Image (cartoon, coloured by chain):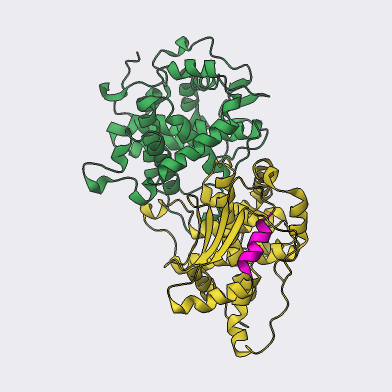
Amino acid sequence: MNPMLRAAALAAALAMANALPQPAHAQIPAELKNPKIAIAYIPPESAKYEPIMQRLKDRQLLEKLAAFLSPLQLPHAFYLITRECKEPNAFYNPTRWRIEICYEMIELVEKVAPQPDAPIDGFTRDEVVVGSFVGVLMHEVGHAVFDMFSVPVFGREEDAADEMAAFIAGQFNKEVAFTVTRGFAYMWSAFARFGGEPKEWADYSGEHGANQQRYYNILCMGYGGDPALFKDFIDKGWLPKERAASCGAEFQQVRQAFAKTVLPFINQSLIKKVQETNWLK
Amino acid sequence: MLTTRPTGAAIAALMASLMILPASAQQLPAELQNPNVEIVYKEPRTAAFKPIAERVKQRRVLEQLRVFLAPLRLPRKLTVNVDECGASMREYQPQGPVIICYEVIDQIEKVAAKADPVVRDRVLIGAFVQAAFHETAHAVFDILQVPVWGRANDAADRLAAFIMVQFGEDVAMQTILGTATFFRLSGRTWTGSEFAEVNSPEAQRFFNYLCIAIGGAPKTFDFLVNPKDKEEQLLPDRRAERCKAEFEQVRMAFNLRIMPHVDPDILVKVRAIQWFVPLNGR
């Protein structure tokens, strides 16, 4: 689903080597089709987003996302679109049953990522661009799933959607878990750095957690799901030990919630195929 | 009807705050019991908590909580303790008892002492009920194996807030506003790795409670968004416009996952109890 993201990540580097043939991308397995899912790349108003849309098209972003989501046994139509939004974001629109990916969001992700060949704290540009893009996408998938399947959500839905993103990241091979968890966490830490800490009482009034909290929540989900893979989070002091102690239980809470409220809506033979596909390649 | 109105002293106010029922404690409806709810007042080790222990015991707060929990059909025992935790708070542990810490009650008392005397007893009542509901919510999620999306502490808050607005305007006002004022006066600022904590900042919790309140009782809590003096708007428009949906989300979750474990006939009886003393003669 985010391979094009990777493409986006590398776009700058590749621009100079434009003449090179495109590397082969993950083939979309033919059986991963869901007639209820429709896609559209909406042309941007601003010419500057044309190249982004073109890259997404070339990399078949929406085709791949549709295939990735094909095991969902949907109660109605579900639309996936890319468009210019006038803000760097992505949305699930519950009145239109659609996920909207903004060209501006891709631009932003590329902006906050480390420069090519200049990793920050061991985070490469590639993993941050791919990981944060997939994280954002899976967050919106979380909102969509909560809405379309009437999933009971007792906690704050925005945190729940982050949990969904981090949980999905862990359902593939270790490389996917590693890239998406780290990339998504990096994005929140970057937003936290740029935006600073909440200061005023009213800064806490939104439905979203603070970027700082979301950063730690993602680290916690990753570590809780696979402590060996993400041992770094502790060793480097990113995830405080006091929080780390509860991450196993936090992950289990999400795993059980997923099993009870979402898994029954997933076609089991198709999801196997989805899990076998290497989406990041 | 309860006639005691707390006067200035914080201790007197606390005593009144724990006198949740309008009827005297011995008039707790005898048929509203729950055989699976066990309550224990543990003796505090710290001398300073002994007066608090005396008061909660005398006011039979756990007996009242047990009446409140009467409609809940539980597959196993739920133990509720008032106990010394040895820390400012203690997270609920699976299979564990619900613990209302003496430290938490002590903290509520201290924060309430900072409040305007006019709202002091409301803070005491609201914050105490909040603590009891929040901790009980964790246990209910655990015992009934309720799937919880979102952070568990926020989920417990949302369920507590949802319950607070199910018992009429007086209960809703006292508990929600008392809780909100308690958070407002807590005086803690968050920074750095504190944002890693499993619990949410007081300010976030403040808005979460107010949001569920106005979502569930829009007329009662309209003043949060539309006060006479715009400067006193407690809940910003941007959040307020989502609160109906936030409340409905909790209601749907409650109806799907908890209501099947509630005896509707007993629930009616519990809802019929006039739980709080109307303050200020209201």
Q: Colour of chain A?
A: yellow
Q: Where in the figure is residue A137, as x and y percent of width and height?
A: 58, 61
Please tell me in which quadrant of the rendered image residue B7 appears: top left
Q: Residue at x 27, y 32 (%)?
A: B118
Q: Residue at x 60, y 26 (%)?
A: B260
Could you tell me if residue A241 is visible in this image?
Answer: no
Compared with A107, A29 (above or below) is: above
User: Quadrant where the N terminus of chain B lies?
Assistant: top left
Considering depth in this image, is B158 or A151 the residue closer to the camera?
A: A151
Considering depth in this image, is B80 or A133 the residue closer to the camera?
A: A133
Compared with B95, A138 (above or below) is: below
Q: Residue at x 66, y 34 (%)?
A: B145
Please tell me in which quadrant of the rendered image residue B264 appears: top right
Q: Where in the figure is residue B199, as x and y percent of width and height?
A: 53, 46
Q: Where in the figure is residue A162, as x and y percent of width and height?
A: 57, 54
The residue range painted magenta reads A60-70
User: Quadrant where the C terminus of chain B lies?
Assistant: top left
Q: Where in the figure is residue A251, as x and y percent of width and height?
A: 67, 49
Relative to residue B242, is residue B97 drawn left or right? Answer: right
Task: Provide the major secondary structure of the magenta segment.
Answer: helix
Considering depth in this image, is B8 or B162 the residue closer to the camera?
A: B162
Could you tell me if residue A178 is visible in this image?
Answer: yes
Q: Colour of chain B?
A: green
